[in-house]
Image: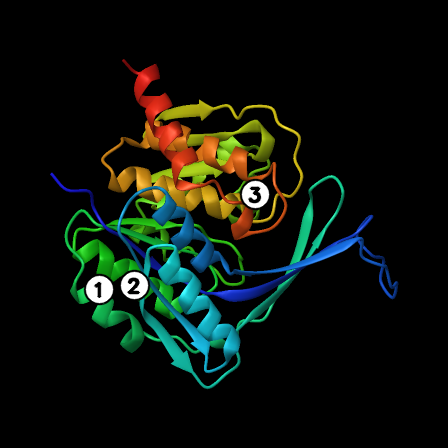
């Protein structure tokens, strides 16, 4: 049986990252110790990570009619992500400014006019080609109405729906019944559920309607809530250089692993390993694990289960 396709619907940005000795105080100007430029956006990041996970990936997004939009489409195609559904819009390509401290922590500010211009008319041609069993992967960058419409459409088509709800900027309660896997980090889980403890937050997401809930825990790994059971996956201990995009690596590789037929627990182990690799390098997509590295993670999980 061939692998399922991963359909990512989300934003794409030009990322400008600045290495700082610490985060600035209000009104303060700091001198950066380094800077870099990359393409990013949670949608594009997750699409690239999924493609490196060894599955066919189609990506629906919006970018401006400018050099940044052209660069994003070319980069996606080079990564093996089908860029045919990245619409050209009249607003400038969205941008993100990323501050990174020596400890690898980051703070991000993004524009979202291009992403906000997306509507179901842009997405529908892609979804017409989706098949039952394909994976739909979404984030919180798009409008509430579009996100709900996509998840509902995906559920009706028999797709497996995965929602990484960051950034949280509207109420998601009516989305969870259309979500097979909710994937917040521990901070987002608390914001969404008002539960200070990650396990309780994951269980609460199930109560709200999600079929399964995953809470990523950074250096501590991740946990999966399904039914009345909690599965915890530990992450290897590494020296973090830059955590930017680690959650996107997790989500993209998790979706790829589901597409390749792994069950949720094994997919979780591969995704945790890939995210851990990504934090040991600076940058966004340039820090993502290579295809060969992710393949080694798949083989390791398979060997551990023999």
- Tell which circle, 2 or 3, labels the residue nearer the N-terminal end: 2
**Label 1: which residue?**
127
Residue 238 numbered mark, or none: none
Q: Are marks 2 and 1 in contact (CB under 8 Å)?
A: yes
Q: Quadrant of the N terminus?
A: top left
How many badges with numbers are in the image? 3
Where does the image place residue 10, in percent across and percent down from the top left? 41, 62
Secondary structure under tag 2 reads helix
- Answer with mark 1 or mark 3, whichever residue precedes in sequence: 1
* Residue neighbourhood size for the residue with mark 1, other residues' Cα within 10 Å, grouped as few (<14), some (14–19), many (≥20): some
- Secondary structure of the residue carrying numbered label 1: helix
Q: Earlier in the sequence, mark 2 or mark 1?
A: 1
Residue underneath mark 3: 190
**Badge 2 is on which residue?**
150
Cα gap from disc 2 to disc 3, whole angstroms: 25 Å
Real-space CA distance between mark 1 and mark 3, rounded to the nearest whole angstrom: 32 Å
Element under disc 3: helix
């Amino acid at each position: 049986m061939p692998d399922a396709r991963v359909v990512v619907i989300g934003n794409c940005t030009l990322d400008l990252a600045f290495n700082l000795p610490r985060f600035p105080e209000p009104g303060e100007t700091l001198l950066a110790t380094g800077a870099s430029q990359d393409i990013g956006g949670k949608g594009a990041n997750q699409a690239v990570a999924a493609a490196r996970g060894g599955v066919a990936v189609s990506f629906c997004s919006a970018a401006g009619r400018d050099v940044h939009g052209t660069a994003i489409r070319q980069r996606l195609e080079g990564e093996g992500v089908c860029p045919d559904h990245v619409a050209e819009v009249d607003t400038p390509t969205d941008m993100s400014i990323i501050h990174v401290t020596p400890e690898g922590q980051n703070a991000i500010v993004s524009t979202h006019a291009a992403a906000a211009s997306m509507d179901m008319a842009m997405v529908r041609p892609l979804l017409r080609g989706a098949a039952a069993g394909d994976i739909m992967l979404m984030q919180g960058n798009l409008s509430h109405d579009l996100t709900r419409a996509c998840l509902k459409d995906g559920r009706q088509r028999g797709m497996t729906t995965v929602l990484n709800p960051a950034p949280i900027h509207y109420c998601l309660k009516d989305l969870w019944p259309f979500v097979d896997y909710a994937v917040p980090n521990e901070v987002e889980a608390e914001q969404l559920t008002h539960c200070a403890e990650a396990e309780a937050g994951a269980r609460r997401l199930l109560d709200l309607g999600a079929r399964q809930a995953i809470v990523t825990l950074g250096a501590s790994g991740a946990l999966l809530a399904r039914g009345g059971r909690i599965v915890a996956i530990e992450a290897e201990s590494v020296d973090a250089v830059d955590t930017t995009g680690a959650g996107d690596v997790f989500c993209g590789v998790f979706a790829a692993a589901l597409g390749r037929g792994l069950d949720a627990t094994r997919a979780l182990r591969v995704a945790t390993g890939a995210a851990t690799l990504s934090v040991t390098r600076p940058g966004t997509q340039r820090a993502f694990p290579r295809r060969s590295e992710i393949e080694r993670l798949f083989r390791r999980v398979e060997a551990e289960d023999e």
